[in-house]
Image: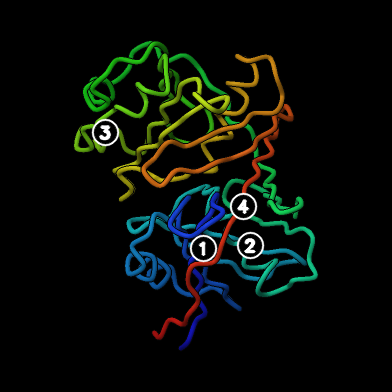
Amino acid sequence: MELRIFQIDAFATKVFRGNPAAVCPLEKWLEEDVLQAIAQENNLAETAFFVPSNGGFHLRWFTPRLEVDLCGHATLASAFVIFTELEPQREAAEFASRSGPLYVRRNGDMLTMDFPTWPLRPLEQPPVALLEGLGRAPRELYSVTKGSNYFAVYNSQAEVVSLRPDFAKLEQLHPNGVIVTAPGDNSDCASRYFAPSYGIPEDPATGSIHSALTPFWAKRLNKKSIHARQVSQRGAELFCEDKGDRVLISGQAIKYLEGKIYI
């Protein structure tokens, strides 16, 4: 069996930036163990698979270890493949997913994703592994009420950049990942994201966490449009808008690789 595969750098304007995602268009679903084996072989933060469904697509995401409920950068990468390689006449795509319907549309030279909002609630008793894993106490701590994540707020971008997490400690928080954020130096907010229990010590660019970051900073800064930077080593830039119970997350993408898988 031959399968097409693309590797797309999402939230990037040139290769080697943003977050690489593998994208495998399928005509029909393969067995789950085969999907997981492909993701493990790719050894990227996420491999996205989709099949045509009711005029749109059914989309699934796998890390090297397991299937996840939502992945922003691999959704952006999937839409990029559809718009540039498979159906260039399309202006928008709807994806059915484990997180409900997701929408992506062309927006000039960017793609805009329409995702559900992730509310926060204060974390009264943070796990010891969270505090020890971060190594520096944040000024505020929350848990994300949708999606499995903790949310730590620091005073400055420099503090976020200087964090050297103990990933063995953070891995004990499964199924939770950890979002860390602060006011940005040349953006509205800066962030990093750690998910070692999913096989992703640090994710270079994470669209989904902006479902929480956008409403938080929109309220904090009293503005609807948020310019966000993920200050990982590769770096990423996102443009977000708070729409109440939905969040618009925009960015660019670029193709790095195209090929075939033989199984």
Identify which amino acid the numbered label 3 is placed on: Leu
Q: Which residue is mark 3?
A: 170
Q: Position of residue 42 (x, y in %)?
A: 36, 67
SS assignment at label 4: loop
Position above or below: 149 against 8 = above
* Relative image position of residue 227 (x, y in whole percent): 61, 31
Q: Residue 211 appears in which quarter of the rendering?
A: top right
How far apart are labels 4 and 1 at the CA level?
10 Å
Q: Earlier in the sequence, mark 3 or mark 2?
A: 2
Residue depicted at x 54% and y 73%: 29
Say whether disc 3 or disc 4 marks the residue closer to the N-terminus: 3
Residue at x 72% of width, y 27% of height: 244
Residue holding disc 4: 252
Please state which amino acid type lies under the numbered disc 4: Gln
- Callout 3: few (<14), some (14-19), or many (20+) C-alpha neighbours within 10 Å? many
Q: Earlier in the sequence, mark 2 or mark 4?
A: 2
